[in-house]
Image (tube, helix red, strand yellow):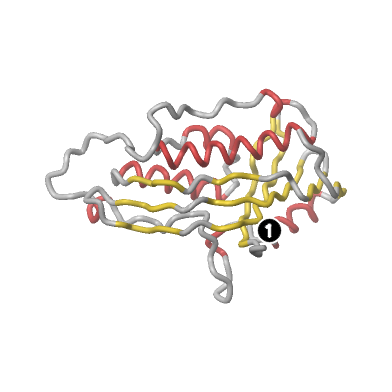
Amino acid sequence: MGKTTDTKKFSSGRLAAAVIAAGLVIAGCSAEEPEPDFTPTMPPSKSSSTLDGEDEEAQPNPAASPDLKPPPIPPEIEEKTLEGAEAAARYYIDAFNYGYAMRDSEPMKEISLPECETCQSHIELIETIEDNKQIFDGGFVELEAASDIFDNGNEIVMEFPSRQEPFVLLNPDGSIEGSSNGSRLITSVLAAYENTSWKIRATSHEMADER
């Protein structure tokens, strides 16, 4: 694992405040700033998006690889180290990518703490997409090397330059519910060491300047 930069010490209160100030919940973006494309538009209710007479049995997502399996949990997340916290952050993104592709929220539930509002929003949205028999095609997020780390021992905030590929959210009739051309992001993840492993307590995603 490459060496991260700019390690800093924060009190617990200042650490939490720093993450919240960065934009803890994507839906909380100000009116003056465009909302990042990290999350697709919330789809309509099942009754409005399911075709009349459509078979209610879940259909496979043809946009996803049939060989795509749940991401393996890295053993490093049990180590109370910077490497363990970063492994948890990267696993969270793997769980995000897998969850939307396969409409399976279980890995995200495993890595996320209940107080992570953004995590819970993604979990609920994945489950809504599954309930509505919709397809999320594309949208994989890739993290680059961490650019900043704020270390408080039991809690660590990591900032990663990242990119999300274009995506389209399709209704069962093939109509487009939402889409994005892809974007550059700054992804911040707050990992907390609880019991015997790192879990995700908060995330934020801000648009990055294109260079």
Residue denoted by label 1: 20
The quadrant where residue 48 appears: bottom left
In this picture, is 1 found above or below 202?
Answer: above
The quadrant where residue 205 appears: bottom right
**Judging from the image, what secondary structure is the residue with disc 1 in?**
helix
Closer-to-camera residue (74/63): 63
Q: Amino acid at mark 1?
A: Ile
Residue at 54% across / 69% down in the picture?
Answer: 34
Count of numbered circles on the image: 1
Closer-to-camera residue (12/207): 207
Q: Position of residue 146 (x, y in %)?
A: 74, 45
Which residue is the extreme one toward the left?
Answer: 53
Q: Position of residue 121 (x, y in %)?
A: 49, 50
Q: Position of residue 126 (x, y in %)?
A: 42, 44
Residue at 85% across / 49% down in the picture?
Answer: 6
Image quadrant containing the C terminus = bottom right
Residue at 51% across / 59% down in the picture?
Answer: 37
Label 1 crowding class (10 Å Cα cut-off): few <14, some 14-19, many 20+? some
147 left or right of 104 in image = right
Is residue 193 in view? yes
Which residue is the extreme one toward the bottom?
Answer: 32
Residue at 23% across / 52% down in the picture?
Answer: 47
Closer-to-camera residue (44/180): 180
Is residue 196 in view? no
Image quadrant containing the N terminus = top right
